[in-house]
Image (cartoon, rainbow, N blue to C red):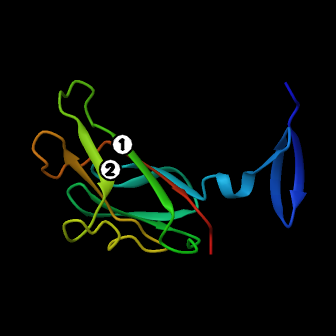
Amino acid sequence: MTAARLKSQNGDLLVRDGSVDTSIKSGISKAYVNFNGFGTVAIQESLNMSSVVDNATGDYTPTLATAMNNTDYLCIVGGQLRQRTSSIAILLQVRSSAENNVADLKTTTQVRHEGKRSDTSSALDIGAGHIGIFGDLA
Protein backbone atom coordinates (compact mmCIF):
# COMPACT_ATOMS: atom_id res chain seq x y z
CA MET A 1 0.00 0.00 0.00
CA THR A 2 1.26 3.45 -0.94
CA ALA A 3 1.13 6.15 1.70
CA ALA A 4 -1.13 9.10 0.86
CA ARG A 5 0.45 12.56 0.79
CA LEU A 6 -1.15 15.98 1.23
CA LYS A 7 -0.28 18.94 -0.97
CA SER A 8 -1.68 22.37 -1.72
CA GLN A 9 -2.34 23.67 -5.21
CA ASN A 10 -4.06 26.98 -6.07
CA GLY A 11 -5.61 27.22 -2.61
CA ASP A 12 -7.03 23.68 -2.77
CA LEU A 13 -5.89 20.85 -0.51
CA LEU A 14 -5.13 17.68 -2.45
CA VAL A 15 -4.51 14.12 -1.30
CA ARG A 16 -2.16 12.17 -3.56
CA ASP A 17 -2.56 8.40 -3.43
CA GLY A 18 -0.15 6.82 -5.89
CA SER A 19 -0.49 8.94 -9.03
CA VAL A 20 -4.03 10.24 -8.41
CA ASP A 21 -4.81 13.62 -6.82
CA THR A 22 -8.16 13.98 -5.02
CA SER A 23 -9.42 17.44 -4.06
CA ILE A 24 -10.37 17.64 -0.40
CA LYS A 25 -11.89 21.12 -0.77
CA SER A 26 -14.38 20.19 -3.49
CA GLY A 27 -15.26 16.85 -1.89
CA ILE A 28 -16.33 18.02 1.55
CA SER A 29 -19.72 19.18 2.76
CA LYS A 30 -20.20 22.93 2.40
CA ALA A 31 -23.18 22.97 4.74
CA TYR A 32 -25.08 20.61 7.01
CA VAL A 33 -27.77 20.80 9.61
CA ASN A 34 -29.35 18.52 12.19
CA PHE A 35 -32.58 20.09 13.40
CA ASN A 36 -35.51 19.30 15.67
CA GLY A 37 -38.52 19.15 13.34
CA PHE A 38 -41.29 18.85 15.93
CA GLY A 39 -42.71 21.55 18.20
CA THR A 40 -40.28 24.45 18.27
CA VAL A 41 -38.01 23.83 15.28
CA ALA A 42 -34.43 24.41 16.35
CA ILE A 43 -30.97 23.70 14.97
CA GLN A 44 -29.13 21.08 17.03
CA GLU A 45 -25.85 21.09 15.05
CA SER A 46 -24.87 22.88 11.85
CA LEU A 47 -22.20 24.18 9.51
CA ASN A 48 -22.93 27.19 7.27
CA MET A 49 -26.66 27.16 8.13
CA SER A 50 -28.18 30.30 9.62
CA SER A 51 -31.72 29.05 10.27
CA VAL A 52 -34.45 26.49 9.64
CA VAL A 53 -37.97 27.88 9.20
CA ASP A 54 -41.05 25.78 10.03
CA ASN A 55 -43.47 26.71 7.20
CA ALA A 56 -46.22 24.20 8.06
CA THR A 57 -46.60 20.56 9.12
CA GLY A 58 -43.63 18.68 7.68
CA ASP A 59 -42.51 21.70 5.62
CA TYR A 60 -39.08 23.19 6.42
CA THR A 61 -36.81 25.77 4.82
CA PRO A 62 -33.16 25.70 5.90
CA THR A 63 -31.11 28.78 4.93
CA LEU A 64 -27.39 28.76 4.21
CA ALA A 65 -25.25 31.49 5.76
CA THR A 66 -22.96 31.54 2.68
CA ALA A 67 -24.58 30.98 -0.72
CA MET A 68 -23.75 28.19 -3.12
CA ASN A 69 -22.30 29.09 -6.53
CA ASN A 70 -25.39 27.84 -8.41
CA THR A 71 -28.42 25.56 -7.88
CA ASP A 72 -26.71 22.46 -9.28
CA TYR A 73 -25.36 21.42 -5.87
CA LEU A 74 -26.12 18.07 -4.26
CA CYS A 75 -28.49 17.96 -1.31
CA ILE A 76 -28.70 14.81 0.81
CA VAL A 77 -31.61 14.57 3.25
CA GLY A 78 -32.72 12.21 5.98
CA GLY A 79 -34.63 12.23 9.19
CA GLN A 80 -35.98 10.42 12.21
CA LEU A 81 -39.46 9.80 13.54
CA ARG A 82 -40.56 11.26 16.86
CA GLN A 83 -41.40 7.81 18.30
CA ARG A 84 -39.25 4.70 18.07
CA THR A 85 -42.25 2.41 18.30
CA SER A 86 -44.02 3.81 15.23
CA SER A 87 -44.47 1.34 12.38
CA ILE A 88 -44.62 4.02 9.68
CA ALA A 89 -41.66 5.23 7.69
CA ILE A 90 -40.95 8.81 6.71
CA LEU A 91 -39.88 10.43 3.52
CA LEU A 92 -37.91 13.67 3.68
CA GLN A 93 -37.42 15.19 0.24
CA VAL A 94 -36.69 18.40 -1.60
CA ARG A 95 -40.04 20.11 -1.97
CA SER A 96 -41.40 21.44 -5.26
CA SER A 97 -44.50 23.43 -6.04
CA ALA A 98 -45.38 21.48 -9.19
CA GLU A 99 -45.21 17.85 -10.29
CA ASN A 100 -41.85 16.89 -11.88
CA ASN A 101 -40.27 20.23 -11.00
CA VAL A 102 -37.89 19.54 -8.12
CA ALA A 103 -35.69 22.58 -8.69
CA ASP A 104 -38.25 25.37 -8.36
CA LEU A 105 -37.92 25.66 -4.56
CA LYS A 106 -34.13 25.23 -4.54
CA THR A 107 -32.08 28.43 -4.59
CA THR A 108 -28.43 29.19 -3.89
CA THR A 109 -29.30 29.89 -0.24
CA GLN A 110 -32.35 27.70 0.50
CA VAL A 111 -33.63 24.18 -0.15
CA ARG A 112 -37.20 23.69 0.97
CA HIS A 113 -37.90 20.22 2.37
CA GLU A 114 -40.97 18.26 3.33
CA GLY A 115 -41.57 15.32 5.60
CA LYS A 116 -44.29 12.83 4.64
CA ARG A 117 -45.65 9.52 5.85
CA SER A 118 -44.58 6.76 3.47
CA ASP A 119 -47.91 4.93 3.79
CA THR A 120 -50.30 7.85 3.10
CA SER A 121 -48.08 10.63 1.71
CA SER A 122 -49.62 13.01 4.24
CA ALA A 123 -47.47 15.77 5.78
CA LEU A 124 -45.65 14.74 8.93
CA ASP A 125 -43.51 16.69 11.39
CA ILE A 126 -40.30 14.76 11.87
CA GLY A 127 -38.39 14.29 15.09
CA ALA A 128 -35.09 15.31 13.51
CA GLY A 129 -34.05 16.42 10.04
CA HIS A 130 -30.59 15.87 8.61
CA ILE A 131 -29.43 17.77 5.53
CA GLY A 132 -26.00 17.85 3.84
CA ILE A 133 -25.03 20.21 0.99
CA PHE A 134 -22.18 19.45 -1.43
CA GLY A 135 -20.96 21.68 -4.29
CA ASP A 136 -19.15 24.97 -4.83
CA LEU A 137 -19.64 27.99 -2.61
CA ALA A 138 -20.18 31.36 -4.28
Residue 30 against residue 106 in the figure, above or below: above
- Pick whichever, 28 or 55, lies toward us: 28
Q: In this view of the protein, can residue 104 be seen by the observer? A: yes
Estimate the x, y position of residue 12 in percent, counting from the top left. Answer: 80, 61
Label 1 to label 2, Cα distance in Å? 9 Å
Q: Nearer the viewer, residue 14 or 63?
A: 14
Q: Secondary structure at mark 1?
A: strand
Badge 2 crowding class, 10 Å Cα cut-off, few under 14, some 14 to 19, many 20 or more, is many
Residue appearing at x 19%, y 66% in the figure: 99
Residue at disc 2, secondary structure:
loop
Q: Residue lying farthest left?
A: 120
Q: Nearer the viewer, residue 123 or 35?
A: 123
Give the vertical position of 2 relative to 104 (above or below). above
Residue located at (31% from left, 42% from top): 127
Which amino acid type is shown beneath numbered disc 1?
Gly
User: In the rendering, at what x and y percent does residue 39 appear?
Assistant: 27, 51
Taking 88 as reference, is 78 left or right? right
Residue 79 bears which disc, if any? 1
Q: Residues within 10 Å of mark 1 (few under 14, many from 20)?
A: many
- For badge 2, the amino acid type reads Gly
Q: Residue 64: percent from the left, percent from the top?
A: 51, 67
First of labels 1, 2 by sequence position? 2
Question: What residue is drawn where x is 26% and y is 45%?
Answer: 91
Say which quadrant the C terminus sits in. Answer: bottom right
Q: Residue furthest front?
A: 19
For marks 1 and 2, give the one nearer the viewer: 1
Residue under label 2:
37
40 left or right of 138?
left
Instruction: Say which residue appears at 22% left-offset and 71% top-offset.
Output: 97
